[in-house]
Amino acid sequence: MRLELDMISNMAFQRWMLVVAVGLFSWSGMLIVMTNGQSLPAVICANGNSSCTIFPAFGPWVDRKDCKAARVVYPTTEKELVAAVAEAVKAGQKLKVISKLSHSVPKLVCPDGDEGLLISTSEYNGITVDKEQRTATLGAGVKLKTFFNTIAKDGLAFPHSPYWAGLTISGVISTGAHGSSIYHKGSAVHEYVVGMRIVVACPASEGYAKVITLTEKDEDLKAARVSMGLLGVISTVTLELQPQFKRSLTFVQKSDDTLEKEIVENALKYEFGDVAWHPAAHMALYREDFRVPISTPGNGTNNSTSFGFLPIETTVQARLLEEFFEATRNESGKCIAGSAQSQIFISIAFGYTNNGSSFTGYPIVGYQNDMETFGTCDEAPFLNGTGFACTWDRRINGTQAFDMDLHIPFRHIGDFIRDVKELVALRPTSLCGAELYNGILMRYMKRSVGAHLGVTEDGVAMDIVSYRSRDPKVPTLNGDTYDEIEQMALFKYKARAHLGKNRPVGFIDSHKRFRNLNKFLEVKNRYDPLGHFSNEWTDKVLNIGGANGRIQTLRPFCALEGLCICSEDIHCNPEAFYFCRSGLVFKKARVCRFEKPELPDVAHY
């Protein structure tokens, strides 16, 4: 029987590598030939623009419950935006804003109930560049890549952004999204906001809705920069720019033996540095990324393998193989496949090119707008399910995953890394699944000075993506290790959850992580005293009326999907031999661990 399993593992591994190879070959070819795509909208309505259902980009909502709205509108001008808000406020409706593709993991975009109004920014575009002032004013629905390429035509650049280009500017700043840096103002996009126009609710005597303009002279801008959409509807955002510049990038693979010491040193040495940590492989991949003179030769590009589109069949086969590893509890299979995949990606510099089409060696030097972000898969030619797509496209049997993104202060990060290493020493193969998602991405963030809800200390944003079953009753292989890391970060090292990612357990006591929460709430109550722009989820995150105490949903299987921290076996799946147990390193953690009873030895079959 052991021999059969080994043969099956070997066959599955070979199939996995074939899938990766075919996918990369197709991906590299599609870098040159681009086709207009058919991205799947986040809002689908049963009757025109009425009776609408909202879908997240990355699989089902974390609680697997539908998100509904009575109607959606698509304003193209500020006048139309004001009219939409006024109509909803007059009717006493809840309002929420949504981008074309809805990349938020928590239910930030869901109006309570099914009678609310959705305002889509998918057609609310437009960019005005002021070359003399070095600013750009963007409509709320402008995507990052469009922004960067537009300002580049005027010899300007924006210093930092998330790595996924498909995000919109209003969503980015509302959730505190960021790149990686502690230089200057840091990597959070909202720190570079110098002005905003927001449509807010107002009394009938003022027409139910009005536009307010905020500049750096207005203290309220500190509330508006990161607001989760709770003040009103963003119309435009004005950002400060810099002269165009180039970057030099080299990925350096090292042992992780000294990671706890070098993680902060890397942040100080490289303006755009980050680290991809692969604990199961005892390896860390350091991103040595910094500015160079504009005259430096090179036309490098960021064509990331993570955000480019792949053949649908490749994505489907990869998911099936991962499901096979999960169903057979094949940790070694994940380890081998993950390690080999990592080395392939490292060998091609994760899709970065020296000339727009191929990687020929380090360093990779390119203009800022070509290097800082990437994402074309939402524009992939779907072709009735036989073409290309994002790996997470809900029309296919592709990726479904959990995304844990927690900010850990520099003062704690070394001890945190040591604890994770101790956990891996006890369970050497337990984090092999992370290898299939490029390891643990560790990006740098600087303490916010411009946002009440910004991070309060310099630190590392730790991003771990892991397998999620399509069945909420089916545990993730080694899910207890991921859950222990999550609870260790949150409760031992006072980590803070990214507002646009994470499962509900990541937001336990989240209000205690906002140093200026009272200042934010004062502005929120002034701008929206009736709570038109709030919902049940945001009330829980900010502990409105003590709502954070209800952020966990206690029910059978709840701990398997991060809806709760287990306190009883029923929160796991005891019938599948998953029981609620203490952590191995962080003893205060409570996790669902696999404990199958040992069968008595049998001499002969």
Image: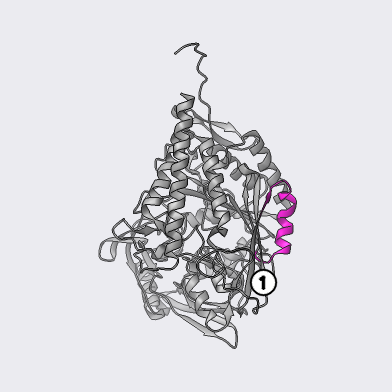
x%, y% of residue 96? 42, 64
Quarter residue 112 falls in? bottom left
Relative to 259, 400 lies left or right: left
Quick check: is 260 in the magenta stretch? yes
How are the colours assigned in the image? one colour
Q: Residue at x 56, y 41 (%)?
A: 432
Quick check: is 50 in the magenta stretch? no
Q: Which span of residues is magenta-colored?
A: 253-272
Q: Residue at x 55, y 37 (%)?
A: 480
For residue 513, above or below residue 121: above
Give the camera-side residue of 339 and 56: 339
x%, y% of residue 94? 40, 63
Please indicate, yes or no, whether residue 469 appears anywhere in the rendered image.
no
Q: Residue at x 67, y 41 (%)?
A: 421
SS label for mark 1: strand
- Badge 1: how crowded within 10 Å, few (<14), some, or many (20+)? some
For residue 311, above or below residue 523: above
Quarter residue 190 falls in? bottom right
Residue placed furthest toward the bottom: 132
Quadrant of the rendering where the C terminus is positioned: top left
Q: Report which residue position mark 1 lands on.
A: 291
Q: Residue at x 46, y 42 (%)?
A: 14
Give the camera-side residue of 563 and 4: 4
Identify which amino acid the numbered label 1 is placed on: Arg
Quarter residue 189 falls in? bottom right
For residue 79, above or below residue 477: below
x%, y% of residue 330? 49, 34
For residue 577, above or below residue 119: above
